[in-house]
Image (cartoon, helix red, strand yellow):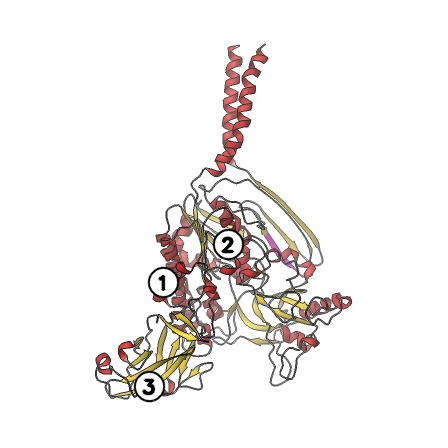
Amino acid sequence: MKSSKVLKILVPLLLMIFLILPGVQYTAQNEFKRLKVVVISADAARFDHITQLAEQGYLPNIARLMFSGIYAEMIAVFPTATAVSHAAISTGAPPGVNGIVGNAIHLPNTTVTSTTSGFSGFNLLSEPIWMTAERHGLKSIVVSFPQSTPPAWNVSKSILFNFYDASAAFTSSTLYTTNRIVGGATYIDFTDATGWINVEKVLGNVVRALESSIRIGDTTWYLYLADLDGDDFYDKLVIAPEKDLLKAYAILNEGEWSNPINTTIVFANKEYTISPLFKAIKLNPVSDFRLYRGLTRPFEALWYNNADVAWSVWNNVFTKTGTFTDGDYVGLIRGWFDEETYIETVNYTNRLFAEWTVFMVKNYDWDLVLTYTPVIDNVYHQFLGLVDPSMPYYDSEKAKYYWDLIVRTYKMVDEFIGAVLESVPPDTVVILLSDHGQVPIKKVVYINGILCNRGYVAVDAAFRVNVTGTLAYAPWHVHIFVNLAGREAGGIVSPANYSLLVDEVARVLWEYRDPETGERVFDLVLPREKAEFLGLTGERVGDVIFALKPGYTSSTALVRDPETGKAVEIAPVIPLLTSTGDHGPHLPHYEELRAVLIAGGPGVIGGYLGTVSSLQVAATIASLLGISPPRDSKLTPIFISREAPPIVFTYTTSITTTITSTTAITIRETLTTTATTTLTSPVQTTITMTETIVDYTLVRIVGLIALIVGIVVGYVLRRK
């Protein structure tokens, strides 16, 4: 009798629980205050450097974000290249899945030497986080991010930009100079000035004046060089569209930058709006006159998906910042200007992306913002080796100056972060991350030079690649492709000889040594089928994969040695003429290659998380937004905010590989689960991990209901 009465009470209660549970789960996962997310990618920011400078007080805004939130070392994918790493970050998918296996990608059914851009969204095979957000009805703003190519993505809510896609024949920077010794410049001459009007109204008394002209696209501008006091020293430079000083675009002293010159030019019968910056580097002597024009990206439809928004950006940002999208290393290595002017171009670049980001954050509706700054990467490429005592060209006195340039660049990025932190609403999680680090380099290894001297790459009399005689070729770092018949356009290697050729090429690389030191230069050499543990699978991956040791980098250029007539195989770095820092053909586990992940905002738990994977970022962003991760995302999210919506996520992975060299691999699956294995030749290993993340909100609710049921049942039993 007692049990019958208990059942009469218990059954309805249990029925009620089962009816309520789906709603409880729905509520737990959907009724929350949705967080906003801003992701800032600081290209090449190294974990060791950024944490050191933050702790030393150089980076107050980054330190505030870091020490009030979370920070972690982040392991990038391989290759450790910008396009590859950003694709992994935005999709959560490894390179072999998302298709971005290099900054340049070789596709089947093309000649073995041909490539397409890894930065293009048209080549990304996996869903990026901005498309995931769009699919869930959220609004994204992508200020700049590799593969954000606006025409590649069909969106209705989101605003996409990629200013790097703005490119015309006049886009590149140049130096207008009278000095014919300066390389790669635009050469001009001065004559006595004639026909100029309104000179006295603008400059007052001019004792002597010279004139010249320059062309941007097909449009001519005029230069007026004025000596104001007759001392044979030219004091002012005027840049004007006509010989009328009242219409001058800029009037400059020696060493002075212009404001952005917002105007139109004509090129190939088409009108373009531009906003370039000029610097009067040197006015005297006239025989070494130097006027620098910075990168000149025009307003054109290639780089935006909303013309009205883009035009607003142009008029509110680019007319104030100019249109630098990278520090101008070309001007530095060609000797157009010195390191200080180079750092000024770096600063203009950072300002463009910072002010653009803040403008979008303040003036448009959004749930997710992705943005970017390349400046740390820019400066490392030029100066990183100059601050490393292990490099053969290291100079301890000069190293202090170059380290100061690096610190100044990090401080620019810190200002960017500070501006964003001041602009975002309080329900925003701000994430600062990088795609990889950089290693200092002492020598460049010419991959195709090695192959050429051993008969695998054929060249003509002009030392250009002869595809019809080439057996194997490296179209980009890391990947070597066999010129396989039936796969490559004009391929000559029969499938029957494929495996033998792959083995030969792999052996040539693995046995190659630095002729000066006798040390191996390659860290890893693998055939494609054994590269799966690196995330490299599929037809876009080379038949042979290689990685170089730190201290070395690779080039695919073919350079003839004038003394021997053979191809150059290895050559020393020449500071300020070639890069002293690099990334890409290096395995990501080295300390110098460690990227960074920093986050702060509502409910963000404090402290150092240890090591995470760049493949976790997309899922982490999705979890903060309360949406499912991108479709090809492979790893679990990093749980960084207590205010993020709860998620139930189960992940299992299995990796089996055999490799022919020794290396260590660390796989970080969650905040609390790390599996480490060392693979040593010739051993086969299988790593299997399963992790289930439980919705603890749901557990608490179920527990509470169970407690209530228990109390009711206990009460009934006691009454009876």
Residue at numbered disc 1: 317
Q: Going 50% across and 57% down the picture, which residue do you hit?
A: 595
Q: Going 34% across and 62% down the picture, which residue do you hit?
A: 316
Q: Going 26% across and 77% down the picture, which residue do you hit?
A: 246
Q: Is residue 659 magenta?
A: yes
**Residue 325: in sight, yes or no?**
yes
Left or right: 399 in relation to 258:
right
Looking at the rendering, which quadrant does residue 299 occupy?
bottom left
Looking at the rendering, which quadrant does residue 665 occupy?
bottom right
Q: Residue pushed farthest bottom?
A: 192
Left or right: 601 in relation to 488:
left
Q: Nearer the viewer, residue 192 or 152?
A: 152
Q: Residues within 10 Å of mark 2 (few under 14, many from 20)?
A: many
Residue 211 circle label: 3
* Nearer-N-terminus badge (2/3): 2
Quadrant in the picture for the N terminus: top right
**Label 2 – label 3 distance at C-alpha:** 56 Å
Residue at numbered disc 2: 73
Rendering coords of residue 125 (x, y %): 59, 57
* Nearer-N-terminus badge (2/1): 2
Amino acid type of the residue that numbered disc 1 sits on in the rendered structure = Val
Amino acid type of the residue that numbered disc 3 sits on in the rendered structure = Glu
Q: Nearer the viewer, residue 410 or 710?
A: 710
